[in-house]
Amino acid sequence: MAKKHSRVVIIGGGIIGCLTAWRLAQHGAEPIIIERGRIGHESSWAGAGILCPIQPWLYPDAFTRLIEASLALYPDLQKELQSHTGISPQWLKSGLIMPFFPDDAVNHRQAAIDWSNRFGWQIEQLDTRQAKEAEPALADDVQGALLWPDVGQVRNPRLLKALRTLLQSEGVEIRGQTEVEGLIEKAGRVCGVCLTDDSTLEADAVLLAAGSWSGVLGKQFGISLPIKPVKGQIVLLKSQPGRLTHIVKHDRVYFVPRRDGRILVGASMESVDFKRGNTVVEMHGLLDGLLRLTPQLAHEQIEHQWMGFRPGTPDGLPFLGPIHEKPGLWVASGHYRNGVALAPITAKIMSGWILGEQPDMDMACFSPNRSVQPSSVLGFPDSVECP
Ligand SMILES: Cc1cc2nc3c(=O)[nH]c(=O)nc-3n(C[C@H](O)[C@H](O)[C@H](O)COP(=O)(O)OP(=O)(O)OC[C@H]3O[C@@H](n4cnc5c(N)ncnc54)[C@H](O)[C@@H]3O)c2cc1C
């Protein structure tokens, strides 16, 4: 187990690696982030920033408890980032609305209500008139909706910029454009990493936080971590503040209204390995969803589109904890669709755990050594071989 003042090498400078580095530094440790490209420019930049799982009722209860613990940390985190850096991550409780339509393939109404009541999440059942009042842009054939008024969002690029600025100003070492390719092991313990430029870096502990690439790297390290990329494409509309006020979620699409009026339309779910770029068919699917649900937005201007790779796992749950067969190696990866929502609790738990403090939550469900049960609803969009 590493101790205070320990040197911890973190592989990957996404939201998980960066926030864990910050918490480690606050505990008196010496984190070093090794990032192959630019800090926070992969999944953590690309995501929609919705602070709630898309269909939380599908997950095991342990996951809901982890999410709740994480979301409870967001108000202080965003204040901390803003006061240290002057950059606002635009944390906003915009609420999330889930409308219903006559041609819905699946109706999650009852499952959503039951789950919300069980966990004490505030929920409002809106009839058709109330749904249209809450979100006038919804199509006229909407048949009521569910509204979670407390669901929030952040703007990922701003959050990552604030985090990077904070780390730099506090003197945390960040090595960009630097790639890890192997581990240094001595006397049965992991004690550093090998870089692709043939140099090495010694450490008391190594944290694998390489997002979608953690599965590939795990294989290089001789461990099995079934993490693979699930590509998500997004379209950004330039609109006016107030055209949409809540996050709208329906079936395969969601719309996220930003404070400045921009509306993010997301997101595809694709198993295409690491193939980058936006495609006609997925852009069409997203815009088709927009036209069906909110035809009033048909003439908004398309400003931008992008994609990212979610670090997917077969059961939809992250891998958090020590790798038993490689003492000194830890993993915090596979956050799939919920890495932004789960980042604060991941960083809190992992920083303490690496420095010798046992988590105060039951982490068995997220153990990298668990026997993973693939889930057809939470796992990969289709079955592609894992590393
Ligand atoms: C379209 C889309 C929508 C999403 N929407 C949401 C949402 O609304 N809410 C939510 O909570 N989550 C959402 N997510 C998921 C969330 O963005 C991810 O779970 C989260 O960003 C994962 O963070 P990470 O730090 O693990 O990975 P990343 O941000 O991908 O960071 C991993 C880093 O590791 C680096 N790396 C890889 N290999 C190496 C190596 N060998 N050496 C050094 N560095 C390496 C990479 O370059 C990368 O920067 C979404 C994701 C996408 C793509």
Image (spheres, rainbow, N blue to C red):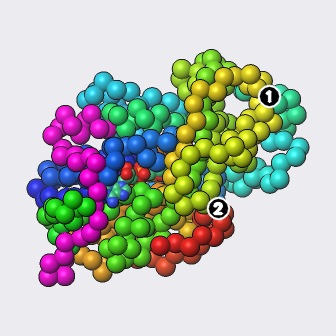
Query: Which of the 4 quarters of the picture holds residue 324?
Result: bottom left
Label count reads 2
Q: Residue at x 76, y 26 (%)?
A: 298
Q: Residue at x 69, y 54 (%)?
A: 114
Mark 2 crowdedness (10 Å alpha carbons): few <14, some 14-19, many ≥20: some
Label 1 with label 2: CB-CB less than 8 Å: no
Q: Can residue 123 be seen in this snapshot? A: no
According to the picture, the residue beneath numbered tag 2 turns out to be 381
Q: Quick check: is 199 in the magenta stretch?
A: no
Q: Quick check: is 175 in the magenta stretch?
A: yes
* Extent of the magenta region: 163-189
Q: At label 2, which amino acid type do we have?
A: Pro
Q: Is mark 1 within 8 Å of ligand 1?
A: no
How far across and how far down the image is residue 221, in percent?
32, 73
Q: At label 1, which amino acid type do we have?
A: Pro
How far across and how far down the image is residue 127, in percent?
81, 34
Check the image and report above or below for 163 versus 332. Answer: above
In the image, which disc is placed on residue 295? 1
Q: Does 303 sit left or right of 210 as displayed?
A: right
